[in-house]
Amino acid sequence: MSRKIRIYPPVIVTALVALFFAVMAISSIVSEAEQEAARQQAEEAAATQAPPAITLAQPTETPWPTESPQLTQEPTYTNMIHSYDWDGEDERMLAKIAMAEAEGESVEGKALVILVVLNRAWSDEFPDSIEEVIFQHYGNVWQFSPMAEGGRYWTTEPDAGCYEALELVMGGWDESQGAFYFESTGKDGWHSRNLEFLFEFGGHRFYR
């Protein structure tokens, strides 16, 4: 028995092929539309997310002092009063030179004269002892003019103020600023032209 083969008309075949391609085209369009929609949703979600916070390092602030610091001037010399051992004769000579050079001065003024002698005795630029400093001279030129023959060192005796000045110095008082020289305020001689001026006290200018 032979099988008969059904032959479809060409119109039906053409219609089926067209339908197939139409379905494929629609599927492709739907797929692309779904992909585009997903992409847009992803972009919108990314746009709505807040950007990460960026923390900037703050510079460290240096606190300013509320008050200006007190500046302490460093002394240009070292007080050596308690490092020198003098005896009774040294004390007598110091009192006499204070009287000879500063009889009309206050106790502090007399003490400054004593300190000039001591500053020299402690310095390498001058003799090592109080006596040698007081009696230092070059020919007829004395470092302390009252030491010349017939000078006030020989003709006057220390008063109570000289010994008060000596006690003041022995107690540690020193406002001499390391002075090595002094002269009367009424003079404008070698000292003012050649030495470093430190200060003026009473009737004397002091130099280094």
Image: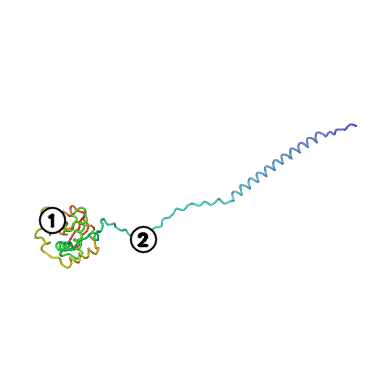
Residue 137 sits above or below residue 40 on the image:
below
Please give the name of the residue rendered at 13% of the width and 56% of the height, measured from the top-left corner.
142
Quadrant that contains the N terminus: top right
For label 2, count other residues whose C-alpha is less than 10 Å away and answer few (under 14), some (14-19) or many (20+): few
Please give the name of the residue rendered at 36% of the width and 61% of the height, measured from the top-left corner.
67
How far, Cα to Cα, is label 2 from label 1? 52 Å
Quadrant that contains the C terminus: bottom left
Residue reaching furthest to the top:
2
User: Could you say where residue 14 lies in the image, as x and y percent from the top left?
Assistant: 78, 35
Of callouts 2 and 1, which one flags the residue occurring earlier in the amino acid sequence? 2
In depth, the one of 115 and 6 nearer the eye is 115
Q: Which residue is mark 2?
A: 67
Q: Quadrant of residue 134?
A: bottom left
Residue 66 sits above or below residue 45 on the image:
below
In depth, the one of 38 and 109 nearer the eye is 109
Q: Which residue is mark 1?
A: 142
For label 1, count other residues whose C-alpha is less than 10 Å away and answer few (under 14), some (14-19) or many (20+): some
Q: Secondary structure at mark 2?
A: loop
Q: Quadrant of residue 133?
A: bottom left
Q: Mark 2 or mark 1: which is in front?
A: 1
Q: Quadrant of residue 167?
A: bottom left
